[in-house]
Each structure stands twice: as C-alpha cells, then as structure tokens.
Amino acid sequence: MLASDSMSLAHQSGNQRQAVDNSDSDSLIHGIGRDNSISCLIRCSRADYGSIASVNRSFRSLVRSGELYRLRRQTGTIEHWVYISCNLLEWEAFDPNRRRWMRLPMMHSNECFFFSDKESLAVGTELLVFGKEVMSNVIYRYSLLTNSWSSGMKMNSPRCLFGSASLGEIAIIAGGCDSQGQALRFAELYNSETGNWLKLAEMNKPRKMCSGVFMDGKFYVIGGVGGSDSKLLTCGEEYNLATGSWTEIPNMSPVRSGAARENEVSAATEAPPLVAVVDNELYAADYASMEVRKYDKERRVWLTVGRLPERAASMNGWGLAFRACGHRVICIGGPRASGEGFIEVNSWVPSEGPPDWNLLDRKRSASFVYNCAVMGC
C-alpha cells in the first residue's frame, strides 16, 4: 500500500470525527496535524504502542480506540504475534520479529473453568478463551486495546471442541459438542468490531474435535469425529461467505489410512488436525511420522514436503502448536521429563522452499502448550 493511500484512509477517518480544537495535543505530533500523525503511527510496530500510549491522553485514547488497528488492517500493515498458554489461566504473547515475550494479566475464574478443557481463538484485537463453569459454557475475552480480561459474552449455541479460524475482524466457529457430548452441525460468525454472534447455515455433517482455516476467502472445517460411534471423518466442508452455503469436500483431512492407521490410538484420543494456511496454501503436521504435508487443492490429495522440527514432541498431537503466522508457519513444542523441560518456537517460510526450520526462541516450561492462537493486527 502506498503512503498516499494510507494518508487518504487516515484523512477519511479524520473526517468522520467531530470537529475539535486544533491544540497541540489533538494534532498528536506537533506540526504535521492529526491525520499525518496517524499515517506515521500505523507504520510503527505494535510493540511500541504501549510506549506511545503513555505519551499523553490523546495518544492513549487513540491507541485504545482501536482506530490504529483498523487502519493498519485496511493498509495491510499487519504484524502477527503468537499467544500461548503453558500454565492454566496464564497467557504469554511472543513477538516473532523482535523475539520478545510479554506476559498477559492473569485470568480470574472459578475452579471449574480452571480445570475444564479450553479452546482459544484470536480475532481482530481480541483473544477469546472458551471453557466451562459449573453449569454453563463461558468465554473470557482479552482485549489488546485495554490489556485486560472480561467475561459475559455468549454464543447462540454454546459448545466446546469446535473448529475455528479468523479473518481480520471476523471469525467462524463450526461444529463442536454440546454439554452431553453430542457432535453438532451448527456454525456461527463472530464480528469483533460489533461483538455480535450470527448463526450460519448448518453443516452437512455433525463433527467435533475438528479444525478450521480460512483459505482463498472461504472458511473450511477439517476432520474431526462424528456420529454415535465417534467415527473419524476424513472429509472437510467449505463455507462460502458470499452464498452462505456449505459444500462437502472428500479426503480433505490429513489422516492416515489402512495399516498405518490400525496401529494408532483411537480417534477420540487424538488431537484435532494440526493445520495451517500460509499464502492460501494448506499445510498439516503429522505428529506420528514427524512430517509436514501440503494439500494439493487441484487433485485433493496430501503430499509430504518435509520434516517437523526435531524436538516437536507431543502426546498424540496434544501439546504441539502448528499455526500460520503471516507468511510463515510457526511450530511450538519441546521435550519434557519429570515435570521439567522447555518449549521451542520454530518458524518456516514455505515460499522459500521445503521445511527448513529456524529456531526463534527456547524457554523453560514445566508443561506443554495447552492453547495457542495467532493475532494479526
């Protein structure tokens, strides 16, 4: 995006605000005006926004309003941070560009939520953590704008073990199971700008323990288990946002079949498919064979393209994070024994060739990765 385009967007944003006096504080950066100031600020790293917000009240109000992040999204000025939880109720953010860790405020919840299974999703400037309290499901929301947690948000159809993915300020949640463990067909769209949940058309098949991705502007739910016998699903489904309809796609899940499958654990004990989309190409981590696979969209087959990082340990796929992070794939995991160990953050850029993993950082951790999400804003 050209600088002139960015300045035009900032000018449009400025025209939408009510007229205010042209004081030094309102112009933000003295001498160049508010709109030019915003045009400069959206090019700063989001890691610097905390310091920028401390300059004065006007800067703090601007950062907390979310306006900078909306303009960054429009101009394509996006930075991706990885959010992980290796200890219950504790979250950290990792900036892969500066290779710096930042601790989020502690979540405050009851004991039931503490021990419940959790799903996580980053959308817009929010991190959503889904779990269960004594009698109902609950969603905790972390706001990047205020650096704080809140709760009270509810889906139309509360669930767990669903597939999900985000695209800018929206996210889609599909499948999962209800409080009785019954697999669901339901899907919902969440808009982080409005805070609203919208019911979508039902999927063709009920499924839980599935994964979700956005690719080529469409949402895909992949794999999982369904039916009364918790049968492994090898198909995926494509949701077209323009038509509001689902299309089943056979053999889209990166599962193994035949003899290779017979010696493995049951579908109910495996982690959901470990998948990531980078530059509209779908990749998967095969934890058993320690391989990386790529989906051929034309032939609808999975091809092995390389190996996972050497220390990408997991328990049937649990504890291993495999996520898209901008133009790269991030793989987080590591060995541990007797409550001691560490996690490694490795990255690979698919456009540069077969998997050649770059170790970004390593840190001690007494536990594996419980939850992981990537926020791009």
Image: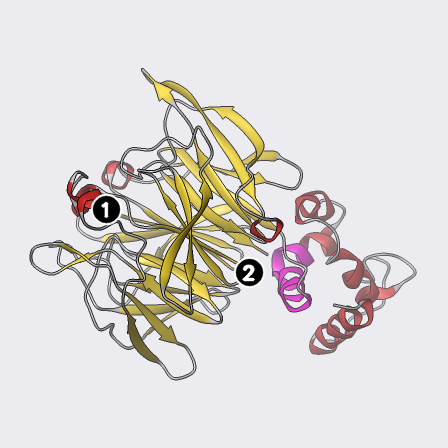
Residue furthest out toward the bottom: 243
Give the extent of the magenta segment: 61-75
Q: Position of residue 106 (x, y in %)?
A: 44, 36
Q: Residue furthest left?
A: 228
Question: In front: 97, or 106?
Answer: 97
Quadrant of res 190: bottom left
At 7% across and 55% down in the image, what residue appears? 229
Q: Residues within 10 Å of mark 1 (few under 14, many from 20)?
A: some
Q: Amino acid at mark 2?
A: Asp
Q: In the rendered image, is residue 134 in sight?
A: no
Q: Looking at this view, is 17 or 218 the one in front?
A: 218
Decide whether residue 65 is among the magenta residues.
yes
Q: In this view of the protein, which residue sits in the foreground, 138 or 9?
A: 9
Residue 142 position within the rendered picture, expressed as x and y whole percent measured from the top left: 46, 49
Q: Give whichever of discs 2 and 1 has the lower sequence position.
A: 1
Lateral position of residue 103 relative to residue 312, left or right: right
Q: Which residue corresponds to mark 1? A: 133
Q: Residue at x 70, y 49 (%)?
A: 45
Residue 276 versus residue 106: which sits nearer the camera?
Answer: 276
Q: Main secondary structure of the magenta part?
A: helix
The residue that mark 2 highlights is 279
Q: Is residue 132 above or below residue 85?
A: below
Whole-percent x and y of residue 296?
42, 62
Residue 1 vertical position relative to residue 150 in the rendered view, above or below: below
**Residue at figure coordinates x 36%, y 73% from the top left:** 239
User: Helix, strand, or loop for circle 1?
Assistant: loop
Quarter-of-image position of residue 348: top right
The colour scheme used here is: secondary structure
